[in-house]
Image (tube, coloured by chain):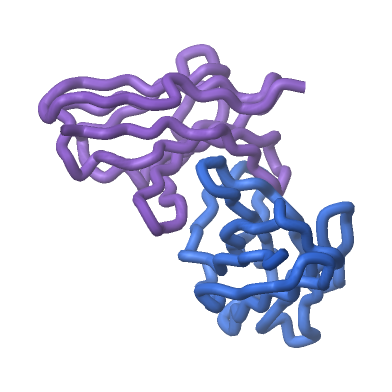
Chain colours: A purple, B blue
Amino acid sequence: GAGVSQTPSNKVTEKGKYVELRCDPISGHTALYWYRQSLGQGPEFLIYFQGTGAADDSGLPNDRFFAVRPEGSVSTLKIQRTERGDSAVYLCASSTVGAGEQYFGPGTRLTVT
Amino acid sequence: DAKTTQPPSMDCAEGRAANLPCNHSTISGNEYVYWYRQIHSQGPQYIIHGLKNNETNEMASLIITEDRKSSTLILPHATLRDTAVYYCIVRVLLARGEKLTFGTGTRLTIIP
């Protein structure tokens, strides 16, 4: 079956612009996660959704970052007033509730110039 | 979540068993050991997890010491496609989902 998909695969934007990154989870997975990965580092947790609601957003670095999942399926990560330090690969994962493993998408590489 | 310690890099000859160690001396009784790997330019991939018994699946085996303070991931017959960064993670398995806390992992290189 189809895995987790993320669009776009690459995004280049100028400092100060607004960007949206999209995640399509595996069908039927109620849990959805966003992570961010900087070069040479492991992925860093940002936010977790259970259904439509954010169950844990403790990893969002500041109020420029926001994520939604209005219908409990597709999720969008939104970054306002982008900064060069936001450049990273943004990963999305999904899972069934109570399952141990998370399934990751290929990521969106964001470059802020 | 308990902290893990892994060697930064390892090499293994193709066709041999790759043994990747992980120390988690502060692990709690209800925390599981998970292994993921990340091949270059891809998202992390789940490999295996366990609580206290040894586990085996089609990808690997997981050996957890009796005191649960360390574990070893074994890839029985390593191939070039197993070259990746391997992450050992310990976490509680809750009825709801739970975030993963990644360290910097072990970069495994399979040598032809």
| Viewer-side residue, A54 vs A21 | A21
Answer above or below: position of B107 versus A85. Answer: below
- The image quadrant of residue B76 is bottom right
User: How many numbered discs?
Assistant: 0
Measuring 61% from the left and 62% from the top, which residue is drawn there? Answer: B86
Residue A97 visible in the current orientation: yes
| Viewer-side residue, B75 vs B79 | B79
Residue B89 visible in the current orientation: no
- Judged from this view, the residue extending furthest toward the front is B112
Left or right of A91 in this view: B22: right
Left or right of A60 in this view: B39: right
- The image quadrant of residue B55 is bottom right
| Viewer-side residue, A44 vs A11 | A11
Left or right of B47 in this view: A48: left
- Judged from this view, the residue extending furthest toward the bottom is B67
Horizontal and vertical percent position of residue B16? 82, 72
Left or right of B82 in this view: A34: left
Measuring 21% from the left and 24% from the top, which residue is drawn there? Answer: A13
- Judged from this view, the residue extending furthest toward the top is A71
Measuring 47% from the left and 37% from the top, which residue is drawn there? Answer: A91
Horizontal and vertical percent position of residue B68? 72, 81
| Viewer-side residue, B56 vs A30 | B56
Measuring 69% from the left and 19% from the top, which residue is drawn there? Answer: A27
Horizontal and vertical percent position of residue A57? 38, 40
Answer above or below: position of A50 versus B85. Answer: above
- The image quadrant of residue A109 is top left
Horizontal and vertical percent position of residue B23? 61, 81
